Image (spheres, grey):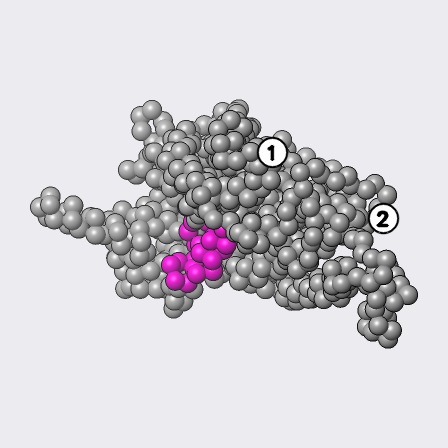
Amino acid sequence: EDWQGGSKREGDRGKGERLGDNHTMKLPPALILAAAASLTAADEYNHKYSAGDKVDLWVNKVGPYANPQEAYEYYILPYCAPETRHHPNEAGSFNALKAHSIGERLGGHALRHSGHDLVYPATATAGEAGVLETCTTDPLTEDQVRLFSTAASDQWFYQMYVDDLPVWGMVGELLPDLDAAKAEHYGSDVSHLEAAVAAHAENGGEFKPYVYTKRTLKVSYNGERIIKVDLTSEPASLTEVRAGVRLKFELDVQWAATDVPFHSRFDRYLDHAFFKHQIHWFSIFNSFMMVLFLMGLVALILLRTLRKDYARYALSHTGVGVGGKRDVEEGSDLEDDDDDDGKPLVRGGQAGTEDSGWKQVHGDVFRAPSFLPLLAAILGTGWQLVTLVVGVVLFAVAGPLHGEVHEERGEVLHAILVCYSLSSVVAGYASGGYFKLYHATTAAGRGGKGATAAGGGATQWQLTMALTVLLLPTVLGGVLAFLNGIALVYGTIFYIPFLVMLKLFFLWVFVSVPLCIVGTLMGRHAKLGGGRGGDPFPCRVNAIPRPIPDDVPWYGVPANLVPFAGLLSFGSIFIELYYILTSLWNYKFYHVYGFLLGVYAILCLVVCMTTIIVVYFCLNAENYLWQWTALCSGGSTALYVFLYSIYYFVFKTSMHGFVQTCFYFGYMSLISLGLGTLCGTLGHWAGSKFVRTIFQNVKVD
């Protein structure tokens, strides 16, 4: 039975380790080194073994099943190891950790050798009985008994790897007082054991901690490749944990031939019934229909409402009649048309010359927003995140070409680090270009080149560059430092070692920061045309800002519109969000990256459409402060994502404890903040395109 699916006594599917020891012949030293290097490369990268090769069994972590981030090193429990070359040294410590990549360490992996040497079988001996390896602990102390008791009561599980295939198993159980006849009564039938526990609990009986002492590791292979690994804990081996007792642990290693091809060996870990459920397909269709609806709404604004706006504004510039009013022929379309408020475009055959609605703010709509350096840095960071997500998702979608990312420990985190570092140039270019574009409309910018090159202008440039470089790393570093301190105090394997932190710091200082600076300089010197006469904006910015009216309808107030925009964006992704959160917090391998790419595209479209609608209503209320409104309109999606994460934590998981709660909400805060920055940037871009489009098509005196 699938351990992930519900049975916690049969851990079964696993992603083992590719690093194996190689058998060498008595050859000259040079040939031995060459042969060892060749064989090691084959084991590590090709997963190929020959008869007699050593296959390493690695132990990774142990911890409560309900708390994925509350994981400890396997040997925090008083397990023993057999008398092999991997046995503890005289100091009593186990062999050093396996070499880990940065991605593995960030993912919370801490592999140590189990002490068991698995020997790859020859084809002729495939049908022989398995090999039984045993070890016995020293007499258990009170502290060790307490550790095992905690593991049994909190349903701790452990994880092992064989040739990059993971296997899971339960540490122990809280059971009634079983006597020596428990094997006769229960044998290996787990259902009988569970029934006995339930009956004992109803009667209010006392429970005692028991530990599984015998495991069966069945390894299936096809030729020179390991295909499948199953781990079974024998209920008959449950042994009560008491002070002074020696526990004898047994590992029965069995080999079996199979005809399953190597390329499909990881399919059994992928829950296709869950991820490719009919509801998943329906959610994509539902989101697509939402996109069509929003596109229709935006088209209605652009083709109908704006057409009438343009027609009304154009009347005052195409010739006037007596009294400053233009005569309109009776029976014309303009005479019959009404605007959105039911008012005719012309009255009595004449059109008014006074502007109304969004054209009133043509002299202020391209005014620099408040806190320009901060907004430029946020938008630069947002474009970096947009690029990062596209790069990582495309890398995952291309898995069949370079290897599926869910089959490699830390592969996704590696891709994120690389894409983040390289996309820093995008952040610098976007923030630098945006600052240059709007700085020209500020008092310092209108002072000429001298004012821009020195004094306040130069300081603002430096501030924009510094904020772009430091904004995201500071937030990430602060949250991760807090979580790292908790992991260090509680001794979990999610503690990031100092050497890894040093590597990340060097990666940021020597790759990310220089690329961000280069990008900022490129954006500062980029040619930003597109307006009339080489002006970057379609309309000239007035020296004195006009007042914003207070008496506007409720749909003209940004605070009323922004939550609705975020709700629509969240509605397009919340089902996919459930699958993603389940993969992050419930031990499932996310592998439907095609779905993810499609949902990402839909999210981008929905955010753009909703932001355009919000910006239009605000401009129509003569509110020209649209830049921050557009950013918040898209970014409000993050609020709903975080609220949904609270619902998921309470109703969809069994997480508990200080450590797990801090890690969950710390990570979800970062995810929500990153998603909000990304969506806000897309919304601002869509709003900017919309504003430019409508104002470059009106005639302004």
Q: Which residue was labeled with disc 1?
A: 443
Query: Does the magenta portion include 393?
Result: yes
Front position in the image: 265 or 326: 326
Residue 347 position in % (x across, y down): 89, 63
Region of the chain picked out in magenta, as a range: 386-413
Q: Residue furthest left?
A: 28
Front position in the image: 14 or 591: 591
Task: Identify the secondary structure beneath mark 1.
Answer: helix
Gap in angstroms between the C-alphas marked 1 and 2: 33 Å
Front position in the image: 563 or 235: 563
Residue 63 position in % (x across, y down): 54, 38
User: Callout 1: few (<14), some (14-19), or many (20+) C-alpha neighbours within 10 Å?
Assistant: some
Front position in the image: 255 or 649: 649
Task: Identify the secondary structure beneath mark 2.
Answer: loop
Residue 586 position in % (x across, y down): 59, 48
Q: Which residue was labeled with disc 2?
A: 553
Task: Tell me which amino acid carries mark 1.
Answer: Ala
Q: Quadrant of the N terminus?
A: bottom right
Secondary structure mostly taken by the magenta-highlighted segment of the chain: helix
> Is 29 displayed left or right of 549 in the figure?
left
> Is 18 displayed left or right of 644 in the figure?
left
Closer mark to the observer between disc 1 and disc 2:
1
Q: Is residue 462 above or below residue 291?
A: above
